[in-house]
Image (cartoon, rainbow, N blue to C red):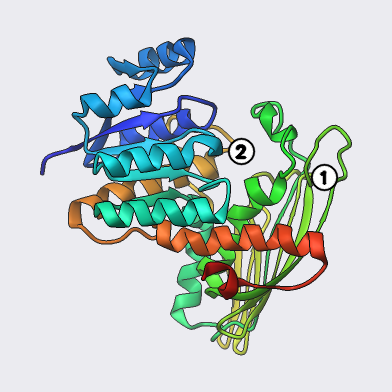
Amino acid sequence: MTELGGALIGCGFFAINQMHAWRDVKGAHIVAICDRDPERLKIVGEQFGIERRYTDAAALFADGGFDFVDIATTVQSHRTLVEMAAAHKIPAICQKPFAKTLDDAKAMVDACSRAGIPLMVHENFRWQTPIQAVKNVLLSGTIGEPFWGRFSFRSGYDVFSGQPYLAEGERFIIEDLGIHTLDIARFILGDVTSLTARTKRVNPKIRGEDVATILLDHESGATSIVDVSYATRLAIEPFPETLIELDGPKGTIRLSQGYRLEVNGPDGMTVSDASPRLLSWASRPWHNIQESVLAIQQHWADRLADGSETSTSGADNLKTFALVEAAYESAASGRAVDIQAMLR
């Protein structure tokens, strides 16, 4: 099978993980990179042995010679770059958050649909080993159809040291972290009909919110709570673990700190270790996220090869992005938001 060649645009903080993962992906590799900062471009190019380097995305697309593009830039450039990919009929992966607005995201999905190319959002959290383990238990039917859930990410970890721009935006935790947790809630319990949210800024040195509590009503009839915080000081720092509680008519599932997976069903309780692998290029505590980067990129390569749709396609991610927009709208208005109305 011919190996696919990709181009990566954006050589910043998180893109290094993507570059490492592309080295491990079977069936795909990176042949060109692009970044507006020549020094950053040089560092990444030399680190990963990439000779084709561009400071201008238009020049990259004009030269061609690659099968897909991985857009790892910040959100402001996403629509322009995705539409550029669509114009050149190049399948695209886009980093989250998908777009600046829901209208932009819809336009990006439409552009790729009209061009007949796949579009996937790099929504990697649902690909984490512990999250997949919870999903597999749920699919087994052990606890029955869940009626309640909680998806929690509470931490005091200093995310601003590596990504200082996070402290500068009017929006923070829902857009940066909550988007992942909301996607996990959708992945586990299904699509959402309505949402109510409350936010708070605890850290006086940042502009956006660093705490959010969100109530979701799911199409299945289940109710869930998504709670995220970067202002929570715990005795043992859980970063970057997402903790999950699920209640069903036949039992419960609990994913707790330290990747402990506890399942209580009709036949009693089982406890297992849902820890992620520590890849050769990964480092604790980031290894959970780093392993999921490899998983989602392998998924992309596999789906390009067989022609089927990705789990986190642009169309699917519109439903997660709508939850982010609805959370901000609800927090501002104090009212519940109808999700289907936002997606029309």
In the shown orientation, is residue 220 left or right of residue 194?
left
Helix, strand or loop at label 1? It is loop
The answer to the question of whether label 1 and label 2 lie on touching residues, with beta carbons closer than 8 A, is: no
Splitting the image into 4 quarters, where does residue 62 fall? top left
Q: Could you say which is closer to the camera, residue 104 or residue 30?
A: 104
Q: Could you say which is closer to the camera, residue 342 or residue 47?
A: 342
Q: Which mark is residue 285?
A: 2
User: What is the x, y in percent for residue 143?
Assistant: 56, 83
User: At 51% from the left edge and 67% from the top edge, which residue is drawn?
Assistant: 187
Which residue is disc 1 drawn over? 231
- Residue 328 showing in the rendered view: yes
Q: Could you say which is closer to the camera, residue 69 or residue 180?
A: 69
Sequence order check: which comes first, mark 1 or mark 2? 1
In the shown orientation, is residue 53 left or right of residue 36?
left
Task: Indicate the amino acid at tag 2.
Answer: Pro
User: What is the x, y in percent for residue 178?
Assistant: 65, 54
- Dot 2 crowding, Cα within 10 Å, few <14, some 14–19, many 20+: some
